[in-house]
Image: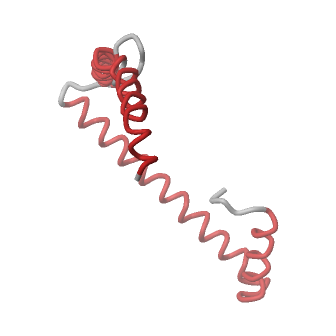
Amino acid sequence: MFGIGGGELVFILFIVLMLFGSDKVPEIARTMGKAMAQLKNATNDIKSEIQKGAEANGLDAKSLNDITGNINAEINNAKSNLLGDTGNLLGDTANEIEKVKEDIDTLSGPIKRQM
């Protein structure tokens, strides 16, 4: 819950108890519970309004899932076309680059030693 451990929660509750006293803590908890319920109701209302607006425009959950599925399929298709069978963007080019690097090292090896 919010990255707060048990000991931290007990410490916070102790501080709240010390600040507000034992008489006010139940009232504060009740008020916070009501506020959380109102927040939950407000978010549910917003979700339902968005869903109603989408349905009014001809979008429902199934068509949205179809659209996202098609987009994901096209992205995967483009990736496979770019990467090829090797799964590496450079593919065989990486091997050729390594060979050229080795050739350069072997040719420049004696030159580097002389400097």
9 in relation to 105, above or below: below
Q: Position of residue 74 (x, y in %)?
A: 27, 18
Q: Residue at x 49, y 59 (%)?
A: 38
Q: How is the image coloured?
A: secondary structure
Residue positioned most to the top: 85
Q: Is residue 54 left or right of residue 42?
A: left
Compared across the picture, whether 107 is left or right of 71 comes to right
Query: At x 18% / y 30%, what residue is drawn?
Result: 57
Query: Could you tell me residue 102's position as x and y percent?
Result: 42, 29
> Residue 40 or 61: which is nearer the viewer?
61
Residue at the spot x=40%, y=21% of the render? 95
Q: Quadrant of the N terminus?
A: bottom right
For residue 78, which quarter of the picture?
Answer: top left
| Viewer-nearest residue: 75 or 111 | 111
**Image height of 98 relative to 109, above or below:** above
Q: Position of residue 50 (x, y in %)?
A: 30, 41
Q: Quadrant of residue 72?
A: top left
Quadrant of residue 86 within the rendered picture: top left
The residue lying at 75 percent from left, 62 percent from top is 5
Q: Residue furthest front?
A: 114
- Outermost residue, left direction? 57
